[in-house]
Image (tube, rainbow, N blue to C red):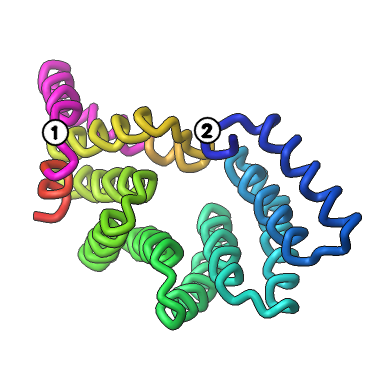
Amino acid sequence: AEYNGEFERASRFAQECLQLATELNAPRPLAYCKELFGLIAYAQSNLDEARQLFEDAIEIFEKVGDRRNVASARINLARTLYRQGEYETALQYVNDSLAISRELNIGWTLGLGLEILGLLQRSRHQDAAALSLFQESLRISLDQDNQQGIANCLGAIAGLAVMADQAGQAVILFSAAQKIRQAIGAAMGRGDQSEYDAYLALARRQLSEEEFVSAWARGLELTLDEAVELATR
C-alpha cells in the first residue's frame, strides 16, 4: 500500500501491526512498524518525522542484533538525510549500510545503498562517479528482478544525461522508467517525484515538442534489455 501511494491504508495496517507488537512486547516487529511509518512519512515529505522513526528503528534493531534490518533502516535514514541536504551525515549512514550489506551479502540494500551513494556523488557534481554507481546499482537490481530499483536507476541515469546535454536520451530513459513504475503500480514519494519532474522539465526545455514526443514514445517502445543497454553504454 505504501509503495502504491495508498498512505492512509498503509498507515492503518502499520498501526494494527504496531498495536500487536506492543501488546506482545515484540521488539523486532515494533522496529519494522517504525521503519514502515518512516517510509510513509518520507513518501509524504514529512522528513523530520521520517528521520526520527528511522533512528528509533535502528536503535531497536541494533539492540536485538538484527544487522540485516539495521542495514535497511540506515539506508532509509541516509535517503532522508539526503533530502534534508545533510550530505556528509547521509554518507556515513550509506557507508555503514553498504559495509553490512557486503558482509552479509544483502543484495537489496546493497543496490539501494549504491543508488543513494550515486545521488550523493551527483550532489557533489561528481557525475562520472555517480554514473558508475547508478549503473552498478542497476545491475544488482536486474539480478534480483527488482523492478522498482531498475526504474529508480534508469531515472537517475536520465538525470545525469540531462546535465550532460543529452536531453533526447534522458527523455527516452525517463519514459522507460515511467513505464516500469506504471506496470508495477509503484508511486514515487513527493520529494523523489519533485526531483524527477524538475529534471524532466529541464530536458523538455532542451527539445522541440516534436523531439520530446518522439523520444517519449521511443522510451515506451523499448524492451527492458534495450533500456538497460542505453543506460549502461
Q: Residue placed at 57% from the left, 56% from the top?
A: 80
Image location of residue 179, percent across then percent down: 29, 30
Q: Give the amino acid type for the residue marked by disc 1 in the picture.
A: Leu
Q: Is residue 141 left or right of residue 215?
A: right
Task: Return the residue nearer the eye: 111 or 93.
Answer: 111
Magenta segment range? 197-225
| Circle nearer the N terminus (1, 2) | 2
> Which numbered dot is residue 109?
none
In the rendered image, residue 220 lying in the magenta stretch gets the answer yes
Q: Main secondary structure of the magenta part?
A: helix
Q: Residues within 10 Å of mark 1 (few under 14, many from 20)?
A: some
Q: Which residue is mark 1?
A: 222
Q: Is residue 143 above or below residue 205?
A: below
Location of residue 71 with respect to 19 vertically, above or below: below
Read off the residue under disc 2.
4
Give the residue type that dot 2 points to.
Answer: Asn
- In the rendered image, the quadrant that contains the N terminus is top right
**Residue at 44%, 83% in the rendered image:** 103
- Rounded to the nearest angstrom, the CA distance separating label 1 from label 2 is 24 Å
Would you say residue 182 sits in the magenta stretch? no
Q: Is residue 228 left or right of residue 96?
A: left
